[in-house]
Amino acid sequence: MLHKIGVLTSGGDAPGMNCAIRAVVRAGLRFGLEVYGINDGYRGLVEDDMVKMDRSSVSRIVNRGGTILRTARLREFKEESVRQKAVDNLRRRGIEALVVIGGDGSYMGAKKLTEMGINCVGLPGTIDNDIASTDYTIGFDTCLNTIIESVDKIRDTTESHERCAIIEVMGNHCGDLALFSGIAEGAEMIITPDHPVPEEEVIRELIALKASKRAMAMIIVCEKIYPNIHEFAERIGQATGFETKAEVLGRVQRGGTPSGFDRVLAARMGAYAVDCLLEGKGGICVGMVNNKIVDYDIYEALQLPRDKHASMLRLINILNK
């Protein structure tokens, strides 16, 4: 019989994490559980930084970005001796299970803790949408809309000055933010790890656009493709005759009020995670597939191919020709 559970957020923050925390706390209390919030991710487990939560602990947080529990990365958590400190702290408090909200690195920590006797359920909290076991991660939709709002503003000045704008968006090594925002913005080119475009082709396409009297061009690029996006933009400008400016949206993409989609997704996943723990499940992660909330073994989830939106790449060729 389960009596006490904990919830933590780990890795990069993402809008909607607070909604997930709220769902875990409210669902846990509804089923008679004591719920503890762990501050600063896995570091809070190791340093025993935990606080008992009640309904008022999660009041009025659904519209707040970031995470009220804060988040941190703890590379040392890969070491079994460090994880043992976390397990000892949990057992001393009588906490039997955890909900871990974060990305794939956080999932691995959750799986290792499960193997040490603390059942854990992972929720996909990351703006990158880089977890293959779910169609969408908590925070992706909000980040996408933040990008679109920013690019709309960049478009205004780009058109006014007849420039080429090369806009670098987040995503780590996953191109979903670039892909979705590029399609939404009608970008002339979208460059992602799954859809690389050689520099020579970029130059050729822009020369053709300029020859056709196009006043402006917009290219959306996933981060980490070019070591220095400003140097890339300078080369493109010199080769094409377009006045070319690079824009790096940066961490503004992480923050902000979570969208309605992210709030509902987080609530569904948080409540589902508590159900899983009550059923005695552990070492699993929650996802949404075809609008249905499902769960996977974490090892299975991490081995899935990350091509869930590969079919959308066809839109690039259809819409940009």
Image (cartoon, rainbow, N blue to C red):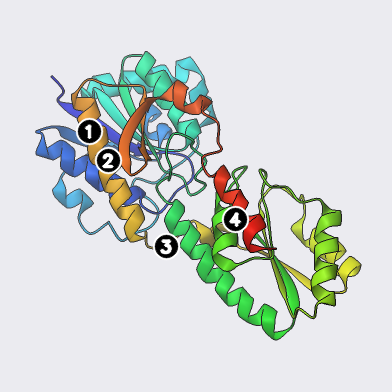
Of labels 2 and 3, the one closer to you: 2
Where is mark 3, residue-wise?
A: 256
Quick check: 249 above or below 88? Answer: below
Determine whether the residue tagged by mark 1 lies in a helix, strand or loop: helix
First in sequence: mark 3 vs mark 4: 3
Q: Nearer the viewer, residue 10 or 188?
A: 188
Report how many numbered discs are placed on residues in the image.
4
Where is mark 2, residue-wise?
A: 270
Determine whether the residue tagged by mark 2 lies in a helix, strand or loop: helix
Q: Position of residue 29 (x, y in %)?
A: 13, 39
- Residue at the extreme right: 239
Of labels 1 and 4, the one closer to you: 4
Where is mark 1, residue-wise?
A: 274
- Residue 24 appears in the picture as rendered: yes
Name which residue type carries label 1. Answer: Val
Please tell me which residue is depicted at 50% across the width and 32% down the height of the picture. 105
First in sequence: mark 2 vs mark 3: 3
What is the CA distance from the residue labelled 2 to the residue labelled 3? 20 Å
Of labels 1 and 3, the one closer to you: 1
User: Residue 281 appears in which quarter of the rendering?
Assistant: top left
Q: Nearer the viewer, residue 45 or 286?
A: 286
What is the CA distance from the residue labelled 1 to the residue labelled 4? 38 Å
Q: Position of residue 317 (x, y in %)?
A: 67, 56
Please tell me which residue is depicted at 22% across the width and 39% down the height of the picture. 271
Q: Nearer the viewer, residue 3 or 204?
A: 204
First in sequence: mark 1 vs mark 3: 3
